[in-house]
Amino acid sequence: MALFGKNRKRDGWLAVSPQPDGVVAVCMRRVDGAPPKVERAAFYPLAKAATAVALERLAKDFDAARRDCTTLLSANEYQLLLVDALSVPPDELKVAIRWRVKDMLDFHVDDATIDVLDVPPEKDAPARNHSMYVVAARNQLIAQRQELFGAARIPLSVIDLPEMAQRNVAALLEPPGRGLALLSFGADGGLLTVTYGGELYLSRRIDVRREQLADAGQREASLERINLELQRSLDHCDRQYHFITLGKLVLAPLAGAGTALQEYLSANLYLPVETLDLSSLFDLSAVEALRGADQQERYFLTLGAALRHEEKSL
């Protein structure tokens, strides 16, 4: 299976995200002229069952066999590399990209599943300024993920990335004609994305976990580190993509330390800083449990994965 797969069954997606303490599932349906509707959401804790058992139960509860299904890789399961675009025919791109990144991977390129994501250049800019993201994951890991879901009768159409899930949410938040910075925190630490016109331009990992933000003894140092990483990343974005004017920084739901983070960044960044309430973005009428910040934090990336649109073919 290629990453960013393109097979389709029917409208709407079932997104399934393994987490350290359980499995999250979201069923989403887009409605023309209305907010995306979350038809169902559930968390299956692993304290009571192994991942395989939780997936089997999920498959039955969500009637997975009749849906397009996607799952997310964790940050340590892939590499995301930004490279200059290659001037080759589309049917030769994947082979050429392998040669370009073979020395940039921490494993042998022959053991890699590779896909590409276009980074659109400035309108009317020379083609030489064009870039693309390359995502690489071990073949063995992809095969194991397919086997795990296949055994549970969850037919995967797509294996996706947290960056793309976050991009999907950002696309709904972008101010007209402006870019958007979106920052989330999870078990893998912080993830900053910058999007413009619904496209991903910048992705940065921030090595601060939500547990560190929640710990009063570590919070001040964590806030300082986050602020420094944001300033560096946003300055780089201004230099690299001068045609993008950022409208604001949006913080994904964060239980406990969310208020402190917003206040600190508002006092130290030049951008307006807002905290996202998912009820302002999605129709959550069928899933009242998602109205709390703790649950919104847990489901954030899975909701983004369920917003998926088909990628442009490269």
Image (cartoon, rainbow, N blue to C red):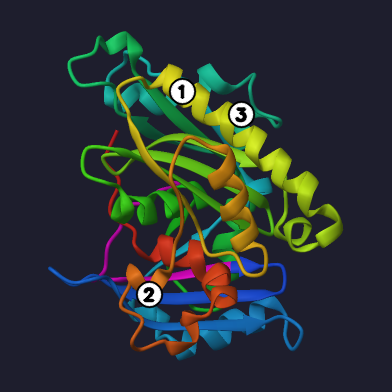
Q: What residue type is labelled 2?
A: Ser
Residue under the image location 62 percent in, 69 percent down: 255
Compare residues 245 and 47 and report the one nearer the observer.
245
Residue under the image location 30 percent in, 78 percent down: 283
Q: Residues within 10 Å of mark 2 (few under 14, many from 20)?
A: some
Residue under the image location 34 percent in, 58 percent down: 308
Instruction: Report the Cα–Cα distance between label 2 and label 3.
Output: 43 Å
Q: Is mark 2 on a helix, strand or loop?
A: helix
- Nearer-N-terminus badge (2/3): 3
Q: Where is residue 231 in the image (x, y as percent from the top left)?
A: 58, 31
Q: Is mark 1 on a helix, strand or loop?
A: helix
From which residue to which does the magenta span run?
A: 2-17
- Residue 275's place in the image compared with 154, above or below, is above
On residue 279, the disc is 2
Q: Is mark 3 on a helix, strand or loop?
A: helix
On residue 109, the disc is 3
What residue is disc 1 on?
97
